[in-house]
Image (tube, helix red, strand yellow):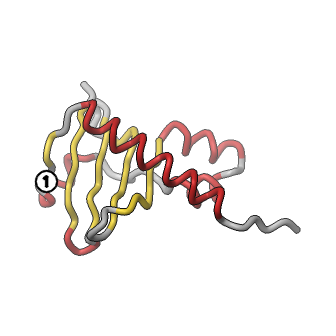
């Protein structure tokens, strides 16, 4: 069963929002940093894997970041809070738009 949750990590002043599969591995992840909760990541595991296979991982991570590399059950110390699918989706869509806009604003380096 899919699970949606969020967890605050004070040492990074970051809210992490997760969509996790039945196995506990992160499917999608959003990171909101600082007092204004600026989106700094909105990554999809499927997209990340596709970018890796296509040799475009650096570009993907520069735009969207990456998902966690451990299952969510290992974060109990960060007291995760359950979210509804709609709550996660709202955060996801907003963060994706901001990450994409940031990528378009970055200068490109061509050799």
Residue 104: quarter of image: bottom right
- The foreground one among 24 and 31 is 31
- The foreground one among 44 and 52 is 44
Q: Quadrant of the C terminus?
A: bottom right
Query: Above or below — where is 14 with respect to 64?
Result: below
- The reply, left or right, for residue 31 in relation to residue 99 is left
Binning the other alpha carbons within 10 Å of mark 1 as few (below 14), some (14 to 19) or many (20 upward) gives few
Q: Quadrant of the N terminus?
A: top left
Question: Most extreme residue toward the bottom, as rendered?
Answer: 11
Q: Residue at position x 72%, y 67% from top?
A: 107
- The reply, left or right, for residue 47 in relation to residue 104 is left
Residue 34: quarter of image: bottom left
Residue at label 1? 76
Q: Position of residue 62 (x, y in %)?
A: 58, 61
Question: Regarding mark 1 in the picture, which secondary structure is present there?
Answer: helix
Q: Residue at position x 57%, y 51% from top?
A: 100
- The reply, left or right, for residue 71 in relation to residue 52 is left
Q: Position of residue 96 (x, y in %)?
A: 48, 46
Q: Residue at position x 33%, y 59% from top?
A: 32
- The foreground one among 80 and 39 is 39
Q: Residue at position x 39%, y 53% from top?
A: 69
Query: Above or below — where is 54 with respect to 79?
Result: above
- The reply, left or right, for residue 61 in relation to residue 31 is right
């Amino acid at each position: 069963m899919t699970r949606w949750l969020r967890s605050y990590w004070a040492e990074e002043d970051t809210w992490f929002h997760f969509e996790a599969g039945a196995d506990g591995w992160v499917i999608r992840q959003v990171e909101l940093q600082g007092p204004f909760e600026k989106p700094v990541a909105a990554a999809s595991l499927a997209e990340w894997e596709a970018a890796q296979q296509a040799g475009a991982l650096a570009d993907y991570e520069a735009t969207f970041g990456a998902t966690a590399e451990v299952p969510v059950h290992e974060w109990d110390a960060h007291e995760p809070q359950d979210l509804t699918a709609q709550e996660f989706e709202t955060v996801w869509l907003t963060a994706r738009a901001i990450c994409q806009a940031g990528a378009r604003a970055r200068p490109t380096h061509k050799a």
